[in-house]
Amino acid sequence: MEKDYLTTLLRSKNTIFKFKDLTLIWKEENLEKIKKRIHRYVKSGKMNSIRRGIYSKDDNYNKDELATKIYTPSYVSLETVLGRSDVTFQYYKSIFVVSYLSREVVIDGQKYIYKKIKDDILNNQSGIKHKDGYSIATPERAFLDILYLHKTYHFDNLLALNWEKIHDILPIYNSKKMNRMVEMFYEEFKKDSQ
């Protein structure tokens, strides 16, 4: 029976699991059995304990997935997404995450930076993509998140953004100041695209 539990875990698309995830995957209600099984798997090297209550199949886990499991709800955004999308050319080793609190966490040498945003914005799914086990902002959502949190920011490549999507997502921030800022950047984009 033990092999079935491990096989179920290994077949999962996810690479990171919270205790609650394991109870659902293993369809087990007895919490003590789950705790003992996890302890046995971690001790024998069949599973890794990343942080209290968070586990991985092995050392080759998805860092974006871990970023969104440490504090939930959250999604990868800001400099991480803008850098990967070539909207900014500055490289950051840290993974930036939008969440309900502001924190910095280092795990296995990787720094995760959490930035607090209002709950009604955080919980709005506009411009959020759901991948295997985690959520990540589109470049347009990350652009708006940066403007909301920083007010002033330098963007290297506004041509990489879809301005129709930006205008569709913008109302969730409910900010006249942001509307003016977006229009200012949109005018800059139009000049660059000529």
Image (cartoon, rainbow, N blue to C red):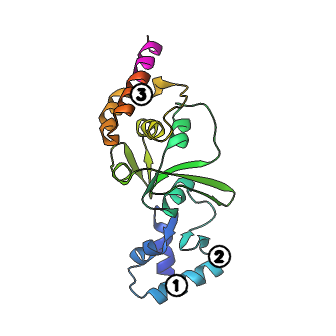
Callout 1 amino acid: Lys
Residue mark closest to the camera, 2 vs 3: 3
Task: Sort mark 2 into few (<14), some (14-19) or many (20+) by Cα contacts within 10 Å.
Answer: few
- Mark 1 or mark 2: whose residue is earlier in sequence: 1
Q: Nearer the viewer, residue 79 or 146?
A: 146
Q: Which mark is residue 45?
A: 2
Residue 70's spot in the image, x, y percent?
52, 63
Q: Quadrant of residue 84?
A: top right
Residue mark closest to the camera, 1 vs 2: 1
Query: Which residue extends farthest front?
Result: 177
- Mark 1 or mark 3: whose residue is earlier in sequence: 1
Q: Which residue is mark 1?
A: 35
Q: Quote the CA–CA distance across marks 1 and 3.
A: 51 Å
SS for callout 3: helix
**Above or below — where is 179 with respect to 12?**
above
Task: Sort mark 1 into few (<14), some (14-19) or many (20+) by Cα contacts within 10 Å.
Answer: some
Q: Are the residues at dot 1 and dot 3 in contact (C-beta closer than 8 Å)?
A: no
SS for callout 2: loop
Q: Main secondary structure of the magenta part?
A: helix
Q: How many numbered markers are drawn? A: 3
Residue 56's spot in the image, x, y percent?
56, 67
Residue at horizontal 60 percent and vertical 75 percent from the top: 46
Residue mark closest to the camera, 1 vs 3: 3
Q: Which mark is residue 61?
A: none
Q: Nearer the viewer, residue 128 or 153?
A: 153
Q: Quadrant of residue 112?
A: bottom right
Residue at horizontal 48 percent and vertical 45 percent from the top: 77
What residue span does the magenta drawing correspond to? 186-193
Callout 3 amino acid: Met
Q: Which mark is residue 181?
A: 3
Residue 160's spot in the image, x, y percent?
47, 27
**Above or below — where is 127 with respect to 45?**
above
